[in-house]
Image (cartoon, rainbow, N blue to C red):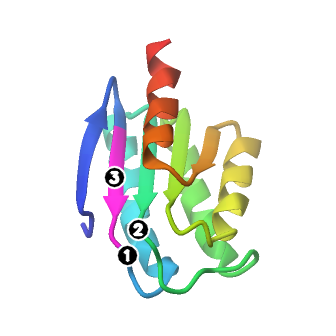
Amino acid sequence: MNIDYWKWIGGSCLYARIPAEPEIKDQLEPVIELLELAKSQELDGLAFDFDHAGTPMKRGEDLWQIDQIMAHAMNSSLKVFAIIDRSQRNAWWLDLVSELEKSGLEARLFYDPQLAREWVETRFNS
């Protein structure tokens, strides 16, 4: 799995930092792998921290990838899903967060990893 590091955040939440790739779509394979792990381990939450991607995707591009992530997320025990995009350039993530929320997950897009971590932790420690 092409991930810099991953660790548990409290109860059963996983934080994963995905390294930069020339194309953001190349960063999505580890997301699918971690979603499969989330299902097998019955995790409650995931937080993905994406390093700067060289080429931002625009809304509407490669919507099949949103569908693929959605299918895996909905077929798991996840309750929360955070995405951290440090580049602040990928509106594509907004579409994914919107779709996840419509399906019942609590999802947010962050530009600051610390805020994302605090948000995920408060969901399970309150």
Residue 119 at x, y = what percent? 52, 32
Distance CA(mark 3)–CA(mark 2): 11 Å
Distance CA(mark 2)–CA(mark 1): 5 Å
- Asked if disc 1 and disc 3 are in contact, CB closer than 8 Å, the reply is no
Q: Earlier in the sequence, mark 3 or mark 2?
A: 3
Segment colored magenta: 14-19
- Which SS class for mark 3? strand
- Which SS class for mark 2? loop
Q: Earlier in the sequence, mark 2 or mark 1?
A: 1
Q: Which of the pair 38/55 is nearer the observer?
A: 55
Q: Residue at x 70, y 59 (%)?
A: 94
- Asked if disc 2 and disc 1 are in contact, CB closer than 8 Å, the reply is yes
Residue 46: quadrant of the picture: top left
Residue on which disc 1 sits: 20
Distance CA(mark 1)–CA(mark 3): 13 Å
Q: Residues within 10 Å of mark 2 (few under 14, many from 20)?
A: some
Name the main secondary structure of what is drawn in magenta.
strand
Residue on which disc 2 sits: 51
Quick check: 85 above or below 25? above
